[in-house]
């Protein structure tokens, strides 16, 4: 009996072990790739991490007689663009649909495609900051020296006043970071020479 237990698995046994290990490895790789889009979906649904919402309707349905200030922040990461908001802030009514503008200029010697990531501060407000239209929904390609106006249409959901932590909120900062898409990886090394453009969202630089 002990001889049977200590006997090698043989070819079929080895194949089973290899197949199990391979399946486990493939499963782990698949989970790693799925984690990013699942996390992104979670953030978009819940507003976690300051992720804004993509609005299904253009209007909130009601506008409150209460002002809130939206501050605009712009940054670049590895892309030789000048990227900035047209204005540092705007004061609107909660529930009012508003259009703001950013601009981007390609300072590199060939066309570059960029993509914008975004969030809001405070993070909890992300679930109530609704974008109707935004340049961040698609990639943007600029020719050398080309400048593009980049609008974003949004409103703040009136339900934000029902959240105890946000009921007295006076200011929301909308922040974008522009970076090159994967196919333009070589440009990243040139971006340091072009400089990094950052508009700070501090009280001083935003006019208090």
Image (cartoon, rainbow, N blue to C red):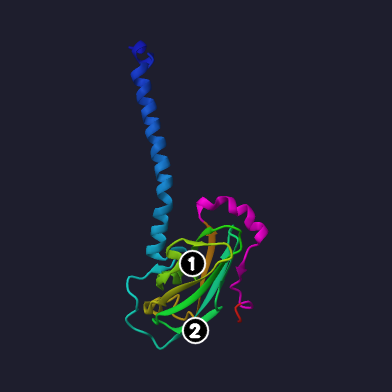
Residue at label 2?
91
The local crowd at label 2, few if under 14, some if 14 to 19, many if 20 or more residues have their Cα within 10 Å, is few
Please tell me which residue lies in front, 4 or 55. Answer: 55
Q: Residue at x 56, y 69 (%)?
A: 74
At x 40% / y 45%, what residue is drawn? 31
Which mark, residue 128? none
Above or below, 73 relative to 66: above
Magenta span? 181-205
Q: Nearer the viewer, residue 62 or 177?
A: 177
Based on the displayed image, in which of its 4 quarters is residue 48 positioned? bottom left
Q: x%, y% of residue 3? A: 36, 10
Residue 178 x %, y %: 54, 63
Which quadrant: the N terminus?
top left
Residue position for label 1:
119
Above or below — where is 87 with respect to 42?
A: below
Of residues 202 and 170, which is closer to you in this image?
A: 202
Name the image quarter holding the C terminus. Answer: bottom right
């Amino acid at each position: 009996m002990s001889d049977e237990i200590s006997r090698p698995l043989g070819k079929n046994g080895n194949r089973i072990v290899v197949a199990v290990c391979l399946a486990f490895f493939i499963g782990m790789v698949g989970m790693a790739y799925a984690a990013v889009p699942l996390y992104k979906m979670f953030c978009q649904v819940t507003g976690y991490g300051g992720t804004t919402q993509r609005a299904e309707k253009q209007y909130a349905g009601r506008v409150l007689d209460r002002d809130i200030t939206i501050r605009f922040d712009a940054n670049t990461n590895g892309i030789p663009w000048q990227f900035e908001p047209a204005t540092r802030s705007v004061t609107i009514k909660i529930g009012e649909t508003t259009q703001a503008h950013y601009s981007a200029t390609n300072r590199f010697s060939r066309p570059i495609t960029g993509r914008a990531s975004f969030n809001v501060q405070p993070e909890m407000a992300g679930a109530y900051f609704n974008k109707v239209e935004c340049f961040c929904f698609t990639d943007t390609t600029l020719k050398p020296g080309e400048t593009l106006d980049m609008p974003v249409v949004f409103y703040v959901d009136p339900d934000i006043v029902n959240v105890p932590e946000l009921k007295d909120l006076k200011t929301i900062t909308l922040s974008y970071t522009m970076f090159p898409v994967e196919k333009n990886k070589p440009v990243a090394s040139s971006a340091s020479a072009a400089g990094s453009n950052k508009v700070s969202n501090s009280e001083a630089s935003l006019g208090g």
